[in-house]
Structure formats: structure tokens, C-alpha cells
Amino acid sequence: MATHNASDKPGSGSPPENRPKPQYGEYAPPGWSWTPEGAEQGGGVSSGGAPPIPDDASTARTPEHAPLSGSAHVNARQQQFGTPPRERNSVDLVVTTILLMFSFAGAAFAVALLSGMPQAFQMMYEQYSLGDFTEPAEFAGIVMFGRVSQVVLWIITVAISVVLLVRKRRAFYVPLLGGILSIILFLVTLFLALAADPTLMNHFSA
């Protein structure tokens, strides 16, 4: 009678040494288990197949991973997306400076004209034989409004131009817009002064 080893019986503890490994798609024989390569030599892979976790989980950030702030963050994003840093336009700087000088001269001229508005009204009275000019009650306030508005507008124009130049953006159009607004303010002030004088309004409307 032939004798059989205990390992040949089904359900025994470990598979025989000469049993081939199961191929892809086949069921593994009873008792067979897969061991990752290098696990026996302590390759650093746990029984679950997951990589080992470092002892210090809260690893300190390296300088290249440290958070950036301000201009360094902007420069980093520009380098990341390939956007070159903005260069200063020297032509725009020169043109803006010249226009600001002209705007200063225009604002000073407008303030001088508004300051001499009572004399100008007296000349119109004499030209149209209307007698002596008497300032209405609101005439001085209108003239003061025109003078202050011209100065404030020029300061705002300079401030916006300087901010744009510091940010290396085009700013030549700001003094141009300021000059247009200065003319509009001057005409509005002149119209308000004429409207406050009933004698001139009656003469022009007749």
C-alpha cells in the first residue's frame, strides 16, 4: 500500500515546495500566499504593501516650499507661467512728466482767471453800459469753489499718474483727462457765476 505524506492531503498547513505558482487569472491553491519581493530581506515594505511612514510626520518645510509673500509671490507666479516682469516705459515717463507740467500751468492759469472774475464782470458791465458791478451774495462762494476744485483736480491727477508710473503702467492719458476735466470745471464755474448775476442774464436773454 502506498503511503501519502500529510502535506499531500487537501487542507493541510503549507503547500508543497514543488507546486507551481498560479498564473494570471487562476485561483490560488489552498494555503498559498503571496509575499512581496524583498520583504524577506527587510526591503522596507510592510505586510499590507504600504510604504513605510517616516518617524517625523511633521517634516519642516524646506526653503523652496516655504510660503512666499508680496512681490516674491508675484515674481514666482510670473516665472511659473512664463510671464516676464513688466519693464518701465521711458517714453511714457517723459511724456507723462511733460503733460503734468502743462497741467500745472493750466491749473494755475485757471485759478488766476477765477480770482480775477470780479474785474472781468466789471469790464463786461462797462462794455454793455450796465453801470457798476455789484457782487451777488453767492458770487464769492462760486469763485472759491472754482479755485479749490482746480487745485484738488490737479493733485488727484498727479497722484494717479505717480501710482501708475510706480507700477510701471502707462500714465500719459491721466494728465490729458485731467486737462479736459479742468476745462469743464472752469466753464461750469463761469456759467454758475453768470447765472448768479441777474443783470447780465437779463441783458443776454433780451
Image: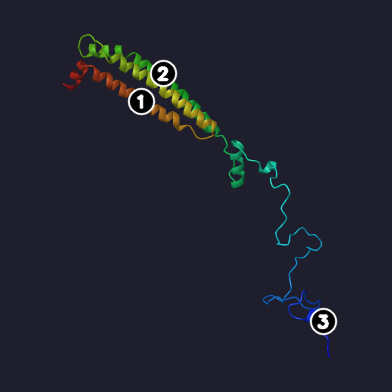
> What numbered label is drawn on residue 108?
2
Where residue 120 sits, quadrant-wise, is top left
Query: Furthest-top residue in view?
Result: 132
* Residue 186 percent across, percent down from the top left: 34, 22
Quadrant holding the C terminus:
top left
Label 3 element class: loop
Specify the amino acid type for callout 1: Ile
User: Which residue is the site of mark 1?
Assistant: 183
- Real-space Cα distance between discs 1 and 2? 12 Å
| Name of the residue lying farthest toward the left | 206
Residue 16 falls in image quadrant:
bottom right
Residue assigned mark 3? 5
Instruction: Tell me: 100 left or right of 52.
Output: left
Tag of residue 117: none
- Label 2 Cα crowd, 10 Å radius (few <14 / some 14-19 / many 20+): some
Q: Residue at point 30% right, 12% down?
A: 118
